[in-house]
């Protein structure tokens, strides 16, 4: 715990002098929700909302992101503590990201800090969404993990691999990635790769993962981009607050799993200063006794200056 706290404090000192740079701006809003998976399930990682504002000047870009993540057990009708399932929890966070990118590589450092428990407003957010879509009201938020300040540093490296043919409808791009996370919310190593093909208009590399999270993108060189994408990834987790914080392992009778895999498939469309991408994501269980993978969708809207 002391090592994680020192790393986060060091990152705060590094990022404190960062100022937004003049240049092109973009706004990205990403919604991740299990309602998009079409499986009729509302459980575990059930909601993730992020809004990212970027002001940029090559080769360094600065992004500011406000986000909220929400986790629940599978049975939302129970008002007692659900033993053997993921506890109710949420994290409301905000922070900067510094990005350095060229034609073939992107490096970034993200520092997010915020609050868990009642201060995350996860209960209010889920109840409001359920009222809007006519879903049952969740009854067990009295047992959510307690409030604490949470901060995490994410270091990302991504590489674009060729071949890639520009200017046609058969462009292809393979991009492996790696992420190191350290803090009092998540400690893990993550890696993966994505393959995009279609009409690629010079768009950037894949956005870094967030347990899950959106990032902004610079304007593509071509006004039209249309592609399909698939991706695979894996995570080796040492600590996850949503499964181990507030003595969750003992209180809820769960055992976090170290290795978690994901698979993604989706489509994207960009035209001039706006872009829209949807991905369907399947994730293997991240705790026991859960046995079935979880599915959810990610919808990302990008607006550029």
Image (tube, helix red, strand yellow):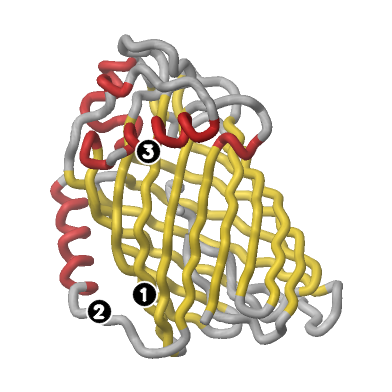
Please state the horizontal and vertical placement of residue 105, each as a whole percent of the image.
Answer: 54, 77
Q: Is residue 250 above or below residue 70?
A: above
For the point 27% across and 17% down, the residue is: 250
Left or right: where does residue 207 sit relative to residue 203?
left
Please tell me which of labels 2 and 1 falls first in the chain. Answer: 2
Per the model, the C-alpha gap separating discs 2 and 3 is 31 Å
Q: Which mark is residue 217?
A: none
For mark 2, does the 10 Å Cα neighbourhood hold few (<14), some (14 to 19), or many (20 or more) residues?
few
Left or right: where does residue 60 sit relative to residue 159?
left
Count the labels in the image. Answer: 3
Q: Are marks 2 and 1 in contact (CB under 8 Å)?
A: yes
Nearest to the eye among marks 3 and 1: give it. 3
Q: Which residue position holds label 2?
A: 18
Q: Are marks 3 and 1 in contact (CB under 8 Å)?
A: no
Which image quadrant for residue 124?
top left
Q: Which residue is situated farthest in the right direction here? A: 169
Per the model, the C-alpha gap separating discs 3 and 1 is 29 Å
For the point 40% across and 14% down, the residue is: 84
Please tell me which of labels 2 and 3 falls first in the chain. Answer: 2
For the point 56% across and 20% down, the residue is: 291
For the point 36% across and 17% down, the residue is: 139
Per the model, the C-alpha gap separating discs 2 and 1 is 8 Å
Q: Are marks 2 and 3 in contact (CB under 8 Å)?
A: no
Left or right: where does residue 18 sit relative to residue 289?
left
SS assignment at label 3: helix
Please state the horizontal and vertical placement of residue 178, each as a whole percent of the image.
Answer: 49, 60
Nearest to the eye among marks 2 and 3: give it. 3
Q: Which residue position holds label 3?
A: 125
Q: Which residue position holds label 1?
A: 98
For mark 3, does the 10 Å Cα neighbourhood hold few (<14), some (14 to 19), or many (20 or more) residues?
some
Q: Nearer the viewer, residue 55 or 153?
A: 55
Q: Is residue 87 above or below residue 75?
A: below
């Amino acid at each position: 715990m002391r090592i994680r706290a020192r790393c986060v404090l060091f990152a705060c000192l590094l990022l404190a002098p960062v100022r937004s740079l003049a240049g092109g701006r973009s706004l990205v809003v990403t919604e991740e929700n299990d309602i998009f998976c079409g499986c009729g399930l509302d459980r575990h990682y059930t909601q993730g909302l992020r809004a990212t504002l970027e002001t940029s000047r090559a080769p360094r870009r600065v992004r500011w992101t406000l986000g909220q993540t929400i986790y629940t057990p599978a049975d939302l009708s129970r008002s007692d503590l659900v033993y053997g399932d993921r506890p109710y929890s949420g994290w409301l966070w905000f922070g900067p990201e510094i990005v350095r990118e060229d034609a073939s590589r992107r490096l970034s450092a993200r520092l997010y800090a915020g609050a868990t428990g009642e201060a995350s407003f996860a209960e209010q957010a889920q109840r409001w969404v359920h009222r809007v879509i006519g879903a049952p009201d969740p009854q067990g938020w009295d047992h959510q993990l307690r409030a604490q300040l949470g901060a995490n540093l994410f270091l990302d490296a991504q590489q674009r691999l060729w071949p890639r043919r520009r200017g046609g409808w058969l462009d292809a791009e393979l991009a492996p990635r790696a992420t190191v996370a350290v803090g009092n919310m998540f400690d893990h190593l993550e890696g993966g790769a994505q393959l995009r093909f279609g009409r690629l208009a010079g768009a950037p590399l894949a956005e870094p993962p967030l347990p899950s999270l959106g990032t902004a993108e610079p304007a593509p060189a071509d006004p039209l981009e249309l592609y399909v994408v698939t991706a695979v990834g894996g995570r080796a987790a040492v600590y996850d607050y949503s499964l181990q914080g507030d003595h969750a392992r003992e209180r809820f009778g769960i055992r976090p799993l170290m290795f978690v895999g994901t698979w993604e498939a989706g489509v994207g469309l960009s035209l001039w200063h706006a872009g829209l991408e949807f991905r369907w994501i399947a994730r293997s269980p991240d705790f026991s006794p859960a046995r079935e993978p979880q599915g959810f969708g990610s919808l990302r809207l990008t607006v550029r200056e």
